[in-house]
Amino acid sequence: MLKLRALNSLIVQISIVMLLGLSALMLLSMQLYSSDRQQALRSVSSESTLQRISALIEVLNKTPQSLHPEIVQVSQGIGFKLSLDSLPVILINRSLDLSQQLQQNLSEDRIFDIRIIAYDRKNHHKRKRHNKKRSRRNSQLSGSVLLGPSLWLNFDSTINAQTENVSLKTILILISLTFIILMSMAWLVKRALKPLDKLALAAKKIGIERDFSALAEQGPSEILPTIRAFNQMQQHLSTFIEDRSNMLAAISHDLRTPITSLRLRLEFIAPSADQRQMLATLTQMQDMLQATLRFSRDEAQKEKKQRCDINTLLSTICYERQEQGVSINLDCPEKVIFKVWPLALRRVIENLINNSLTYAKDENGLVSISIVCTLKAKQLKIQVIDQGSGIAEKDFEEVFKPFVRLDKARDTSDANVGLGLAISRSIVLAHAGTLRLSNNASGGLCATILLPLLDET
């Protein structure tokens, strides 16, 4: 799985392509270099052989014919054979350029009958040191030169055009060069992709911190259109959310006037059951509007996220509740530092506590609440547990909907209109966390908050 993820990396894919390309390029370059070197060695060796032949011919022309066999014998060497014969060994001249070069090397004015042939042959020999066979290709230069009537100088020369194998030093240099090129390329690609990392971080901040700050339009020209489109999307999204919150607040505020007017009119009506019921309905509507306004204000406020000691925060809440006579216990590690919105998180905990105080009373009207905090695997878990009657599992998600109240619903004290749990989940989601409900095996309800530890920069 990790290997597949590594292969999906753009840097790894480009590195593999670059490595294969550089390897192929170096192998091709070494092959071309070896071929050119062999050609140069063959040319030099051929020229050297022709010079030796031309020098020998001049010596033979200036010495008595009786000495020719001895001179030819002495002039021979390893890979260089000479003979004086009545017939030529080479019948047809197949290397016109070499024969012309030999003719030019001769200082005499007469034109010699020169026949030369050059060909390659493959020779296998055993290397004693490594005890293994290797193949090498040698060039063979053979020819016949007419010195006089029925007198031919036949020669056969081996031209070793084999180049030495690549040394270990050269291989290490090539590997080092390849490594440097790959590292430089990886750095350049990572630098080019850095705007995408910033883009991903900005997208995460939208969902977590609701931070709509525009990104700097920097980076490769191929990425700039994406950054511009993202900035435009952020601006439109920010405007939409702000307009929605303002509209909600305006509607809630404007509805307060007609509700107040209706209440005043009802006050002048003679007391009756209908009048009391209508007043109760208006009070409920007023409470709902008040909760909606409070929710809108909370949405508009931008509390600064900061590192907070969760133990201290929970201890303060529990102490204040105990001062009010609430039976509440806290089980939390001594020091748990987390980056949160302290006031918002405090409101979530207090909403859950208020919910338990309202709907988890026993026969004697008492409530027992426990708060358990644990930190494990970069995840903070806060549980608010009571000993009430709990709720049906099918209603676990239903109670998180705004203005939803069950017969035995778990609501907050937010005017008791059904916004408490909705606001609490909204705050937890803003922390990139989750809020879920469950029934205890021994009875009662458990509200669990899970907050991940984010690597924020």
Image (spheres, grey):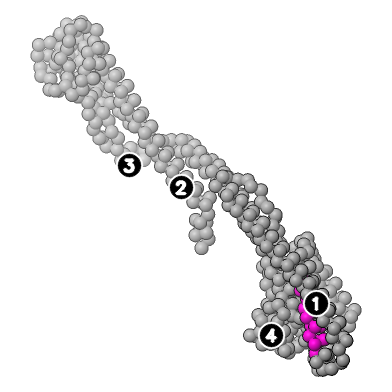
Mark positioned earlier in the residue sequence (3 or 4): 3
Q: Image quarter for residue 202?
A: bottom right
- Amino acid type of the residue tagged 4 in the rendering: Asn
Instruction: Describe the element under mark 1 as helix, strand or loop.
Output: helix
For the residues labelled 2 and 4, the Cα–Cα distance comes to: 56 Å
Q: Is residue 336 visible?
A: no
Q: Residue at x 22, y 26 (%)?
A: 118
Residue 132's disc number: 3
- Amino acid type of the residue tagged 1 in the rendering: Pro
For the residues labelled 1 and 3, the Cα–Cα distance comes to: 105 Å
Q: Residue at x 49, y 51 (%)?
A: 13
For the residues labelled 3 and 4, the Cα–Cα distance comes to: 79 Å
Q: Quadrant of the C terminus?
A: bottom right
- Where's residue 312, x and y in %? 83, 69
For the residues labelled 4 and 1, the Cα–Cα distance comes to: 43 Å
Residue 439's disc number: 4
Q: Image quarter for residue 329?
A: bottom right
Q: Which is in the foreground here, disc 2 or disc 1?
A: 1
- Where's residue 160, x and y in %? 30, 28
Query: Marks 3 and 4: CB-CB under 8 Å?
Result: no
Q: Residue at x 12, y 22 (%)?
A: 91
Q: Closest to the observer: 240 or 374?
A: 240
Q: Within 10 angstroms of label 1, few (less than 14), some, or many (20 or more) residues?
A: few
Q: Which is in the foreground here, disc 2 or disc 3?
A: 2
Query: Marks 1 and 3: CB-CB under 8 Å?
Result: no
Provide the residue span drawn in magenta: 277-293
Residue 17's disc number: 2
Q: Residue at x 49, y 60 (%)?
A: 4
What residue does disc 1 label?
258
Q: Closest to the observer: 424 or 65?
A: 424
Q: Is residue 425 above or below residue 102?
A: below
